[in-house]
Image (tube, grey):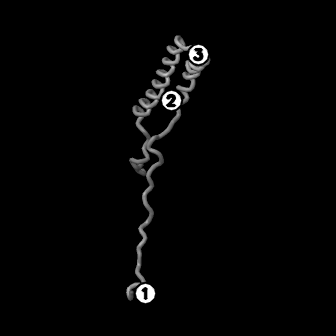
Amino acid sequence: MKQQPITSLPLSPEIERRNRMVKYSIAMGIRIVCIVLMLFVQGWWLLVCAAGAILLPYFAVVIANVHADPRGKSVQRPGAIQVYTRHEDEDER
């Protein structure tokens, strides 16, 4: 059985779940701020806060469930070593 290198392993389920919960909690915190601000603002700001309160739950779920591995691509091993040989012309200099 081929052993998988440690650099290409995915995040553990606990860490991935925690990252999603943090993203979702931040979005829901912004939504609560929008709801509270709706009590104090007027005009266009009221519409902006209402749009945030209505649309943020959908976008929070979408953003939280996007899978992004912060470590990027796996590390590849370097290629073969190239041997440098000196020519006799260079030895005379």
Q: CA distance from mark 1 to mark 2?
A: 64 Å
Query: What residue is pinned by disc 1?
Result: 89
Q: Are marks 1 and 2 in contact (CB under 8 Å)?
A: no
Above-or-below relation of 52 to 2: above
Residue that sits furthest to the top in the current view: 39
Foreground mark, 1 or 3, reads: 3
The amino acid at mark 2 is Ala
Query: What residue is pinned by disc 3?
Result: 46
Q: Residue 68: x and y, percent?
A: 50, 38
Mark 1 or mark 3, earlier in chain: 3
Q: CA distance from mark 1 to mark 3?
A: 82 Å
Q: Residue 72: x and y, percent?
A: 47, 45
Q: Residue 69: x and y, percent?
A: 47, 40
Mark 2 or mark 3, earlier in chain: 3
Front residue (pair 86, 37): 37
The residue at the point 55 percent across, 23 percent down is 56
The residue at the point 42 percent across, 51 percent down is 2
Q: Quadrant of residue 46?
A: top right
The amino acid at mark 3 is Leu
Query: What residue is pinned by disc 2?
Result: 64
Q: Residues within 10 Å of mark 3 (few under 14, many from 20)?
A: some
Mark 1 or mark 2, earlier in chain: 2
Q: CA distance from mark 2 to mark 3?
A: 26 Å
The amino acid at mark 1 is Asp
Foreground mark, 1 or 2, reads: 1
